[in-house]
Image (tube, helix red, strand yellow):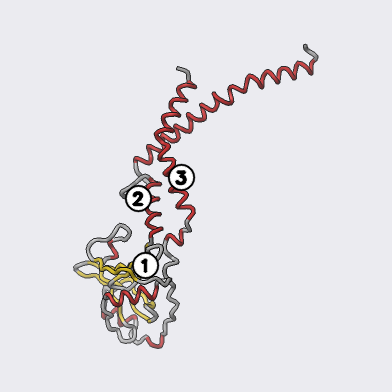
Amino acid sequence: MSFSNTSRKIHKWLMLLLSIQFLIWSISGLYMVVFDIDYIHGDSLIVEDKSVIDHQQINYSFSELLIDYPTAKNVELSTFVGTSIYRFTVQSEQGPNKVMLDPKNGKKIPDINESMAVKVANYYYQGDAEIADIILLTQQAPFELSARHLPVWRVDFDDFARSTLYISVGSGEIVTRRHQFWRIFDLMFSLHVMDYEDEDPANNLLLWVALFSMLAVISGMVLTYYRVIKIRLPKNKKSAFKDLSQKQGVK
């Protein structure tokens, strides 16, 4: 069997086996390129809280906070639904707990309940859709949320993108936001890296398909040489010889 026929068979069978994955790569890659990454991240779902901290109303100092909570970490003074607030994390037997304090008097703000979660969601949600559902998640996190954020309130909105805000029970923060186009993006990423469980591009399946793809490309280049380039070479040589003979006066 000639080298040309061998290359043809290798190329034909490899492309037959890889064609479906090539199509998946094309579709998933196109989806991830077409959509703006900031929109996929959900940046347009929430409004930025531009409330200004009134330092004259802060009667509970940072040093007093450390005295009352000596294990406090990641202490920050920020805003929450238009008001000033202390947020920090303390260590307990169950693990790290998030705490909110009123900077006016140092009193602890209770954990976010359902009615407060609704208020937070409506305050930060950038849209006019109504809340479709609200669920408290304490044990098992969905695939789109890291378990380290539990417990959280999941607030679903009745909009075109089926938007969801996840609000921390302890800090009142929106820990993440999701929508249907992000969920499709997550699926496309899984298909693109050929890892349908961990979404990790470092997997053996992707490695082997990439190697076979390179072999298909190389065999295709060899086939192109034998079927296109080599066939035209004799004609070019004959034409060049004829032109040279005419210049030298040879019949």
Q: Please report whichever mark, 1 or 3, sits nearer to the chain's N-terminal start.
A: 3
Q: Residue at x 35, y 69 (%)?
A: 174
Position of residue 248 relative to residue 139, above or below, is: above
Position of residue 131 relative to residue 204, above or below, is: below
Position of residue 167 relative to residue 20, above or below, is: below
Residue at the extreme top:
251
Relative image position of residue 180 (x, y in whole percent): 38, 59
Residue 26 tag number: 3
Residue at the disc numbered 1: 158
Q: For the residues carrying marks 2 and 3, which lies nearer the camera in this image?
A: 3
Disc 2 to disc 1, C-alpha distance: 29 Å
Q: Label 2 sits on what residue type?
A: Glu
Q: Please report whichever mark, 2 or 3, sits nearer to the chain's N-terminal start.
A: 3
Residue at the disc numbered 2: 199
Q: For the residues carrying marks 2 and 1, which lies nearer the camera in this image?
A: 1
Q: Residue at x 43, y 48 (%)?
A: 28
**Mark 1 neighbour density, 10 Å: few (under 14) some (14–19) many (20 or more):** some
Disc 1 to disc 3, C-alpha distance: 32 Å
Q: For the residues carrying marks 1 and 3, which lies nearer the camera in this image?
A: 1
Relative image position of residue 96 (x, y in whole percent): 25, 68
Q: Label 3 sits on what residue type?
A: Ser
Q: Residue at x 37, y 37 (%)?
A: 208
The front one of 154 and 140 is: 154
Q: Please report whichever mark, 2 or 1, sits nearer to the chain's N-terminal start.
A: 1
Residue 117 tag number: none
Disc 2 to disc 3, C-alpha distance: 18 Å
The front one of 43 and 132 is: 132
Q: Label 1 sits on what residue type?
A: Asp
Relative image position of residue 57 (x, y in whole percent): 38, 87
